[in-house]
Image (cartoon, rainbow, N blue to C red):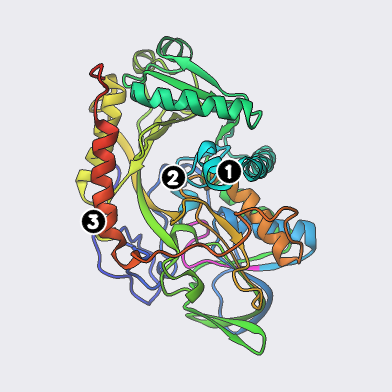
Amino acid sequence: MSESVDIRGPIATQASDDYDPCYDPLRDAHPGIGRDYAPTYWIATAGSPPDDDGPISGDIDADVVIVGSGFTGLTCALFLAREHGIRATVLEANRVAWGCSTRNGGQGQNASGRLTRSQWIARWGEATARLVHAEIQEGFERFAALTDEFDCDAEPGGHLYVAHRHRALDRLRAESEICNHVFGYPTRILDRATVERDWVREAEAVGALHEPLGIGVHPAKLAFGYVRAARAAGAQVHPASPVLDIARSGGRFRLRTPQGTVTARAVVIATGGYTSQQLHPQLRSRIMPILSNSLVTRPLTGAELEATGFRTHQVITDTRVLRYYYRLLPDNRLQIGSRSAIKGTDAANPKHLHGLTSGLARKFPALRGIEIDYSWWGWVDVSHDMMPRMVQPDPAQKLYYGLGFGGNGVSYSAQAGWRLAELVAGRAAKYPLPLFTGALPGHVFAPFRRLGQRALYQFYHYRDERPDRSGR
């Protein structure tokens, strides 16, 4: 293991270079000031972070302020500059792209939120579901173009959705039929023998669905590319500048940071799973932050590659509700991630890493006990209705947000940034889709969400791991 963890209490208000493993958006007022990155494989291999504009140091005026320097905030700044001639000021609490954007699995899929296409139809009807599909596919194409523009170790080819039980394969068959015949999205079902022969020898796989759109990326390289391009286009990026509060005064917004206040005509919030309860009243209890664990092994040997049968570097997920996401990286390391702790204070508990290594061993018995070179965790922004929003929640205020991607934001965040830039520039979306209308929903039981989360995890674990009648 390359990581040693120092458990600390609530984040202090003074600047600190230390990485804080215990940050919790439901507990802490902000993520810190200038804290170092999580010890991810991506940060270790991305090269030097890009130049930035330093912390805010005094009171300044800005046209548009973007809170959060992750994928969504950076692409919003980039598209504002490139397509609308608007130079945004990006405020980041810690280092640039410190949160979700350098802690994910680098899986760009033709998706956003947690719902399947069949669930879209059930919720909104077929006509609206078709428009949502077109929107998300447009977003994937925009993301693909950016992965061509920036050096991010992009590996296209699709997404393999592995059925870990026979009953799950039945669900995939039904979903594939809907994708093919309702949406014209050409997926195909693979039996176990085909998966093993052509893709990967995964011990739990009883079959899979393959979809043609999917790109694996090095997320830190992509984020750093976004930073450089946004600044080159005229945006300013200020790290170590957490927003302590947002107030309106005389029709403008005043965003207070530890060393100065930024006054702006418009504000975009793009803080993902790191959105604190105190940031703005419009966002209180609108996001359910969920922790996800991830690890990267040492490089696999030739014998281990043969034993695991990897013939693809495509992104892979399985059919658990508490899903595993994994892939073979370009340097032949294996990355795998899944759910983690309920609270930030418990994130460093070794049992969560053990849960991940146990899952790795079940899927690939030849890798049982393999050395783990990198281990980390991060917060995912899950909305209460499982779908994201890119909205202006109050028409009387030029405040916008893009949140709720539910772990599927690597690709769609590019479209979210573009959509937010359009909103700021005064261009409404052509179709009033559910993603662009109405605020993120709250929930009556939000104050007790973690009690419910703990119970749901136990239920989902039972349902995910229950054998089929065949015993698998």
What x and y, as percent, mark residue 26? 35, 66
Above or below, 288 relative to 222: below
Name the mark nearer the viewer: 3 or 2.
3
Secondary element type, mark 1 = helix
What x and y, as percent, mark residue 208? 45, 21
What x and y, as percent, mark residue 409? 53, 47
Q: Is residue 421 left or right of residue 53?
A: right
Q: Earlier in the sequence, mark 1 or mark 3?
A: 3
Q: Nearer the viewer, residue 122 or 387?
A: 122
At label 3, the amino acid type is Asp
Q: Which residues are magenta?
A: 89-98
Residue that sits furthest to the bottom in the current view: 250
Instruction: Identify the main secondary structure in magenta.
Output: loop
Residue 255, image quadrant: bottom right
Q: Which residue is mark 3?
A: 346
Residues at marks 2 and 1 touching, judged by CB atoms closer than 8 Å: no
Q: Residues within 10 Å of mark 2 (few under 14, many from 20)?
A: few
What x and y, as percent, mark residue 377? 35, 49
Q: Which residue is mark 2?
A: 44
Magenta stretch contains residue 306: no
At 57% from the left and 53% from the top, the residue drawn is 71
Residues at marks 3 and 2 touching, judged by CB atoms closer than 8 Å: no
At 25% from the left and 43% from the top, the residue drawn is 459
Secondary element type, mark 2 = helix
Q: Which residue is mark 1?
A: 411
At 20% from the left and 44% from the top, the residue drawn is 351
CA gap between label 2 and label 1 equals 22 Å
Q: In which quadrant of the rendered image does the N terminus lie? A: top left
At label 2, the amino acid type is Ala
Residue 20, visible in the rendered structure: yes
